Image (cartoon, rainbow, N blue to C red):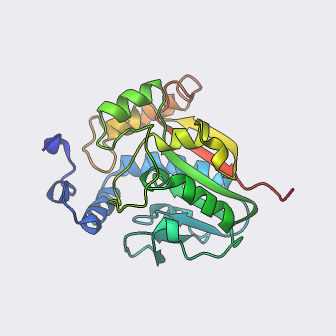
Amino acid sequence: MRNHILLNPEVRPVWGGSDEARLLAAYERVWERKAILRRLYETWYRQIAASLREGNVVEIGAGTGNFKRWLHPRRCWTLDILPGKHVDVQADALRAPLRRESLDNIVMIDTLHHIARPFTFLRRAADMLRPRGRVILVEPFVSVWGWIVWKFLHHERLDFDFAESDGAKEAWDGNAAIPRLVLAGWERERIPLRVRSVQYCEWLSYPLSGGFSYRSLLPGRVLLALHSLERTALFQNRWVSLRVVAVLEKPLPA
């Protein structure tokens, strides 16, 4: 199996299988063990927290509930298609049992690019949000450098010609092209949300950390030093960044 030797030991026994719940449990064990992973994600969590409006917070695609636990004591309701001890509601994002204009903030961390019908979901999200409510996204970004990484060094696909589908899909099946299409693609007008801000981030520290799936390729202190360097404008731009933290906002009624 490709890159099998580089897989985290928690992930190796379940990698490539069909038991999505076991893989999620393995990722939770990686999170608890791997300090560098928590440090990198905390950077994004702080950016998310700074963009939250007053009011309620719902994280869709919450997984192991890492953001919910970090945000405490502020309350965060969680929804995921898979069950988990930190998941409040188990449901498909496209069928979220949430009322119209009932939400102030929707947080999604590496979730949108896993949804089979992302444009349909964002229209539904706009319906669930109150006016000036926000969808805050942390997602892959296909910059010039990002195209190389997501195309050749990552297991998820990169498909700019994808079509929204009603067919069944695995929860972990992702398409790294979706965030770029949502934020700057030719179908942008299909979304009834305006782009309030886009922060570009990451270059090498996260790939070299191995993320949830793979072993770190450098010591944690080296990765943290590299991560600090990446916080400069030289690396936070649409040409070399690997990720975005984006805020979409529902306009006030005309």
Which residue: 13% across, 42% down? Answer: 5
Which quarter of the rendering shows the N terminus? Answer: top left
Q: Is residue 77 above or below residue 229?
A: below
Is residue 129 shown left or right of residue 121?
Answer: right
Q: Nearer the viewer, residue 120 or 149?
A: 120
Q: Is residue 170 above or below residue 217?
A: below
Q: Nearer the viewer, residue 1 or 76?
A: 1
Q: Nearer the viewer, residue 31 or 19?
A: 19
From the top left corner, tell me how far across and down residue 79 is, in percent: 49, 70
Q: Nearer the viewer, residue 127 or 4?
A: 127
> Which quarter of the figure has residue 114?
bottom left
From the top left corner, tell me how far across and down residue 4 is, in percent: 15, 44
> Which quarter of the figure has residue 15?
bottom left
Which residue: 68% across, 44% down? Answer: 195
From the top left corner, tell me how far across and down residue 145 is, in percent: 43, 25
From the top left corner, tell me how far across and down residue 224 is, in percent: 42, 37
Q: Which residue is the extreme one toward the right?
A: 254
Q: How many marks?
A: 0
Which residue: 28% across, 41% down? Answer: 216
Which residue: 57% across, 28% down? Answer: 237
Is residue 65 shown left or right of residue 125?
Answer: left
Question: From where the camera sits, is residue 60 visible?
Answer: yes
Question: From where the camera sits, is residue 221 visible?
Answer: no
> Which quarter of the figure has residue 81?
bottom left
Which quarter of the rendering shows the C terminus? Answer: bottom right
Q: Is residue 44 above or below residue 166?
A: above
